[in-house]
Image (cartoon, rainbow, N blue to C red):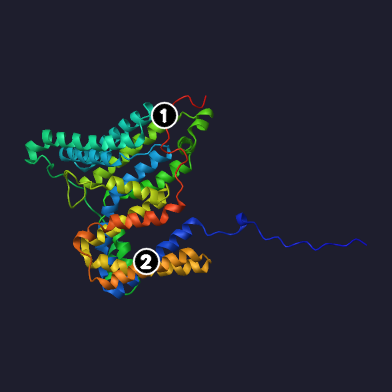
């Protein structure tokens, strides 16, 4: 007789296990964030945290960062570090003000795009053709942008505005709302119901006070994803940032794709400058108005792990915190400390459920420190509240740094013909 061995039970491979789709995880994160904000607003009495006005302000504030971050995404996916986003955005603010003053808001958008693209072209010539260090070239373009716009403002704006640092007032876009959805959400928000009114306030801010530039900014996120990840053009462009030598050996025109990416990067940064110029609170060029948003856009791109969706989340985080401190001041930023404590506890519970003990302990310790700070002070001084967005961005980048994956060849010098 032949003994029949029992067949061992084989667990399904990890790759075959059912995973939660990416869109579902995103919705869960958004829902969790809404719950935390709602609880924080209710317990602290800072209803501005979820108001329609705060959301509208956040959208306007995140828009320049979103454009700059998308510019950084296009360049770095092609292997070119673009520290010069700030300078290209500065050029975009001036170009938008000059064109918008003469021909209106759509001309301002085109002017910002063209002037930013010129900065991107200069960066491409330096880094791709002459293999200049990417950081050196980017810093030089930022300094050049500051000098060029100062000279042009003195030359062209001073006779009209009587101020070499400021342009005449520029005509802005008309705003509109999605009706009847906007009015319906406003009615629900006015009822002041926990969670329901908070959700209505945030959603209401997203569908009211819109401009064509806001719609364009949000539309460019899925468009960038589709172009870069779902087309042959995008595959070839990304291959130049992962392994340009191998891409060239397969017939990809590496230099051409890098030029396209960096010029598009500058054009997007220029659109960010146009968004600043056409901001309803400014409507014109003002020296220094970028305020480092090009660098923050680069940080948002890194926070998003070089992906459009994550970039949008990073831009929204900065824009929201900036909107809160502008509309409600230090008291509202102080309330966010309470919300950060709730978030830390929630993350600790999640990691305990996954049996990841070290990050759970870190989250609990961080939550305890933040809660202690919340109990110690009554408000955040204005000087610190003004820099709350930058501090939040740095903290999030520090936490997320271990799971980042930049393009393999980003920042590396490349010379045509290496793949032959």
Picture quarter with the N terminus: bottom right
Residue in front for this viewpoint, 155 or 55: 155
Q: Secondary structure at mark 1?
A: helix
Residue 137: % across, % down: 31, 34
Count of numbered marks? 2
| Residue pointed to by mark 1 | 256
Residue 21: % across, % down: 51, 57
Instruction: Residue 286: name its quadrant.
Output: top left
| Residue pointed to by mark 2 | 34
Tell me if residue 184 can be seen: no
Which residue is at the far right?
A: 1
407 in relation to 206, above or below: above
Tell me if residue 69 can be seen: yes
- Callout 1 crowding tier (Cα within 10 Å): few <14, some 14–19, many ≥20: few
Residue in front for this viewpoint, 420 or 120: 420
Mark before the other along the chain sequence, 2 or 1: 2
Residue in front for this viewpoint, 178 or 355: 355
Spatial distance from mark 2 to mark 1, Cα to Cα? 44 Å
């Amino acid at each position: 007789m032949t003994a029949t061995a029992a067949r061992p039970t084989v667990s399904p491979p990890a790759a075959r296990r059912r995973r939660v789709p990416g869109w579902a995880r995103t919705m869960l994160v958004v829902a969790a964030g809404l719950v935390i904000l709602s609880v924080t607003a209710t317990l602290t009495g800072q209803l501005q945290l979820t108001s329609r006005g705060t959301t509208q302000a956040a959208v306007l504030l995140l828009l320049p960062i979103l454009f700059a971050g998308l510019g950084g995404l296009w360049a770095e996916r092609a292997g070119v570090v673009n520290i010069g986003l700030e300078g290209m955005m500065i050029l975009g603010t001036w170009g938008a003000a000059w064109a918008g003053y003469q021909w209106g808001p759509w001309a301002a958008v085109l002017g910002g795009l063209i002037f930013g693209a010129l900065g991107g072209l200069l960066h491409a010539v330096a880094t791709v053709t002459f293999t200049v260090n990417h950081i050196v070239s980017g810093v030089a373009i930022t300094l050049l942008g500051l000098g060029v716009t100062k000279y042009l403002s003195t030359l062209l704006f001073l006779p009209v505005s009587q101020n070499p640092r400021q342009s005449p007032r520029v005509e802005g876009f008309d705003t509109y709302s999605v009706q009847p959805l906007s009015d319906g959400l406003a009615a629900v928000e006015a009822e002041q119901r926990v969670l329901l009114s908070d959700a209505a306030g945030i959603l209401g801010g997203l569908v009211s006070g819109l401009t064509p530039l806001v719609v364009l900014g949000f539309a460019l996120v899925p468009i960038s994803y589709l172009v870069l990840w779902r087309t042959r053009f995008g595959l070839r462009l990304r291959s130049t940032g992962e392994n340009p030598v191998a891409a060239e050996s397969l017939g990809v025109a590496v230099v051409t794709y890098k030029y396209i990416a960096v010029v598009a990067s500058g054009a997007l940064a220029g659109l960010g400058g146009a968004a600043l110029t056409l901001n309803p609170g400014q409507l014109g060029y003002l020296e220094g108005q970028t305020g480092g948003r090009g660098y923050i856009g680069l940080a948002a791109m890194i926070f998003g792990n070089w992906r459009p969706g994550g970039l949008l989340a990073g831009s929204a985080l900065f824009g929201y915190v900036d909107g809160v401190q502008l509309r409600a001041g230090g008291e509202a930023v102080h309330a966010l400390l309470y919300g950060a404590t709730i978030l830390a506890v929630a993350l600790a519970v999640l990691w305990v459920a996954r049996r990841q003990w070290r990050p759970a302990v870190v989250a609990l310790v961080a939550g305890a420190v933040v809660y202690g700070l919340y109990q110690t002070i009554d408000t955040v001084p204005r000087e610190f509240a003004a820099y709350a967005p930058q501090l939040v961005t740095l903290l999030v980048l520090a936490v997320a740094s271990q799971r980042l994956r930049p393009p393999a060849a980003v920042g590396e010098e490349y010379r045509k013909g290496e793949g032959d």
